[in-house]
Image: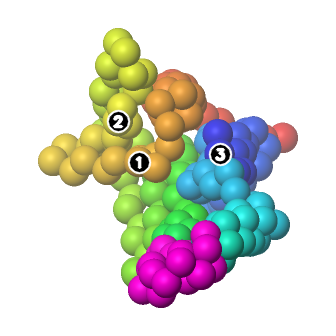
């Protein structure tokens, strides 16, 4: 799983709070985040490299008398910078999935916009997944009646398959029955 992936044991409990449910065992909990392979240090190095190449090439064109080309090289560097910043901003998105005996909660925190919380009854919820022979798992969703809640949309096929397996196991545990008090 990308970033933090946590599967909770029966001893862990869901706090009373956002969900408004009394403390109960957490069957499964995970926080999903988009993966970005470029670190801030790597970003600086890439931008210095692109800027350096653009500057040297632009100066060569400037020396040949093609001064408008110099500006276009600067524009390229600016556009690459803006694209990377947008990518880093979108990486702040999070998706939290919590499965307890009485609720499945999917909480989405987009990079920009409004946070949404979807709650489903685990006994009426089933997991659907779309698999492709060549590309792996393409889509994972929780379906409860007419509601379909896609999960892990920004994950790769292997991570989606792992998420589908984990959620399927958690739903099976809940439907089998989870002891609510432990002595």
What is the tally of numbered marks visible in this picture?
A: 3
Label at residue 2: 3
Q: Looking at the image, which residue is at 42% across and 21% down?
A: 136
Please report the bounds of the magenta region as a residue range: 57-79
User: Which element is circle 2 on?
Assistant: strand
Check if residue 154 falls in the magenta segment.
Answer: no
Q: Give the position of the C terminus as an image quadrant.
A: top right
- Please check the rendered image and state whether residue 73 is part of the magenta-colored stretch, yes or no: yes
Residue 177, by quadrant, is top right
- SS for tag 3? loop
Question: Dot 2: within a 10 Å radius of its alpha carbon, few (fewer than 14), some, or many (20 or more) residues?
Answer: many
Do callouts 2 and 3 mark residues in contact (Cβ within 8 Å)?
no
Q: Are the residues flagged by discs 1 and 2 in contact, CB closer than 8 Å? A: yes
Tell me if residue 7 comes above or below residue 168 in the rendering. below
Q: Residue 153 carries which label?
A: 1
Mark 1–mark 2 Cα distance, whole angstroms, equals 7 Å
Q: Which residue is drawn at 34% across and 40% down?
A: 141
Question: Which of the two discs, 1 and 2, labels the residue nearer the N terminus?
Answer: 2
The numbered mark at residue 139 is 2
**Rendered location of residue 151, percent (x, y):** 41, 47
Q: Which residue is drawn at 36% across and 32% down?
A: 138
Question: Which label's residue is closer to the chain start, 2 or 3?
Answer: 3
Q: Is residue 19 visible?
A: no
Up the image or down, 33 lies above or below 61; here it is above
72 horizontally vs 180: left or right: left
Q: Is residue 23 left or right of residue 159?
A: right
């Amino acid at each position: 799983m990308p970033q933090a992936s946590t599967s909770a044991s029966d001893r862990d409990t869901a706090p009373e709070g956002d969900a408004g449910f009394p403390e109960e065992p957490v069957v499964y909990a995970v926080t999903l985040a988009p993966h970005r392979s470029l670190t801030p240090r790597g970003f600086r190095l890439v931008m210095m490299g692109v800027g350096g190449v653009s500057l040297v090439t632009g100066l060569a064109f400037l020396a040949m008398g093609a001064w408008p080309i110099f500006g276009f090289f600067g524009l390229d560097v600016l556009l690459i910078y803006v694209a990377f910043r947008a990518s880093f901003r979108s990486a702040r998105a999070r998706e939290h999935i919590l499965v307890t005996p009485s609720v499945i909660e999917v909480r989405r925190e987009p990079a920009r916009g409004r946070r949404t919380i979807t709650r489903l009854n685990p006994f009426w919820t089933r997991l659907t997944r779309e698999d492709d022979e060549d590309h792996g798992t393409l889509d994972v969703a929780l379906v409860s009646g007419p509601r379909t809640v896609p999960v892990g949309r920004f994950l790769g096929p292997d991570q989606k398959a792992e998420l589908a397996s984990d959620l399927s196991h958690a739903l099976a545990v809940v439907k089998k029955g989870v002891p609510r008090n432990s002595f």
